[in-house]
Image: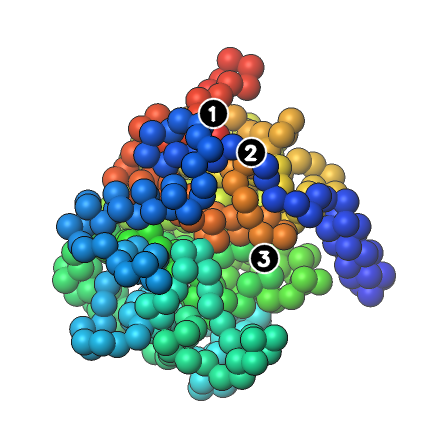
Amino acid sequence: METKRKFLFLLSILIILLAFPFCKSTSPAVSSLTGEETTVPDEAIFQSVLQKRLEEAERPAPKANNPSSGFAMGETGQGQSKFSEVPVYYATDREPTGNNGPYGFYGGKRSSTGLRFGRCMVTIPKIHEIGEIERPSWWSLEFAEDPGEHIILKEISPLQENDFFSELNLKARLADKQEALVFIHGYNTSFDEAALRAAQVAYDVSFAGVPILYSWPSQGTLIGYWEDGENNAWSVPHLEYFLEELAKQNCWEKIHIIAHSMGNRTLTKSLIALARKNPQKPLFGQVILAAPDVNAREFVQEIAPMIRQTASNVTLYASSKDKALALSKQFNHVPRAGEAGENLVVVETIETVDASSIDTDFLGHTYFANTWLLIQDLYEVINKGWNAEKRALKDRKKGNRRYWAF
């Protein structure tokens, strides 16, 4: 029965992929500075956004062959180094594999001793492009990691819980901003992939605080969807405990959270529990729900009213190009909260942003992190605390309720 279910799942993936259009959006570009429709090429818009960020940071313009260097969150202090280092602290309920190398240190099994803590070091090359995770590829004849060319998980250093929070407190006090950015990954994601993504997002949004990864035991495989769902639910009390402990630290001015895909199930259940413990007491700053693979009906009726109590603002990104959520809807027999189109979720307490018009990758599921226009939107949400009305978005209506679009 299990083999048959996996076969049907893979067959459905193929059908869904073939059923969606392969072309990118032909919608007019949107200026990130004025919010007006324009025929200016994407590169010109990118350069104007970049220049605006550089002016805010009072940094000189980058060389023409490195347009994304102005988005860096910091340098290594190594003079002419070809890469920057991004430390990412982590909490995980994955079991270690016994492999002492940084890749494969944690697997997809549930931790036998609850939460584990530590620190990762990720290096990001100066040639890094916004939204990319540059890795060696055989079709480019790259067979080894090069810190000048690739994003690399350099090391993993486990820490005891007390040491973890002590080091986190010190790191926070030394940071440019006393803020944390917690990233929670989705389904089909290994610990290694999650660490690289957490570093890339923090780097690309020029986050000046402390990046933190929460990693639940995803199997890291396409056919692991059901097991991922079970492990995701099992992880809820652990994430609830971690977020509560993190909020208790007196080193933070703000704690922001980004959850992607299935990671939103763990997050929303944890936030509901925290809302019940701390009614009407916002513990967090910006909470960002990216492509949430969550039951849309439950989200509207039960989740949205509760989680809004825990944060200064909640933003939901949705897209009609998301093939992964289209597949999830088929198997769960109910629309997902991250869908757009006729199933777009619009509630009064949350700012919904329709990202359907943004050019994205083939699957259209990681658009929150691999498209520079949305990364710029995240930059304004996280670093400036701007609500949707202040950002370069179009005002839209669904019935009598307001939402936003690129």
Residue 133: numbered disc: none
Q: Amino acid at mark 3?
A: Tyr
Distance in Å between CA atoms under marks 3 and 1 = 27 Å
Up the image or down, 361 lies above or below 78; here it is above
Residue 154, quarter of picture: bottom left
Distance in Å between CA atoms under marks 3 and 2 = 30 Å
Please name the residue shown 32% across and 59% down the image: 64
Distance in Å between CA atoms under marks 1 and 2 = 18 Å
Q: Is residue 43 left or right of residue 380?
A: right
Please name the residue shown 42% across and 47% down the image: 43
Residue 157, given in percent of the width and then of the height, sits at 34, 78
Q: Is residue 264 visible?
A: no
Q: Nearer the viewer, residue 279 or 31?
A: 31
| N-terminal-most mark, 3 or 1 | 3
Please name the residue shown 59% across and 33% down the image: 340
Please name the residue shown 33% across and 51% down the image: 205
Residue 102, given in percent of the width and then of the height, sits at 43, 80
Kindly state the secondary structure of the residue where label 3 is placed: loop
Q: Which residue is mark 1?
A: 403
Kindly state the secondary structure of the residue where label 1 is placed: strand
Q: Amino acid at mark 1?
A: Tyr
Q: Nearer the viewer, residue 289 or 375?
A: 375
Q: Decide: marks 1, 2 in contact (CB < 8 A)?
A: no
Up the image or down, 163 lies above or below 242; here it is below
Q: Is residue 249 left or right of residue 317?
A: left
Residue 27: numbered disc: 2
| N-terminal-most mark, 3 or 2 | 2
Residue 406, given in percent of the width and then of the height, sits at 47, 33
Residue 370, given in percent of the width and then of the height, sits at 48, 53
Q: Which residue is mark 3?
A: 187
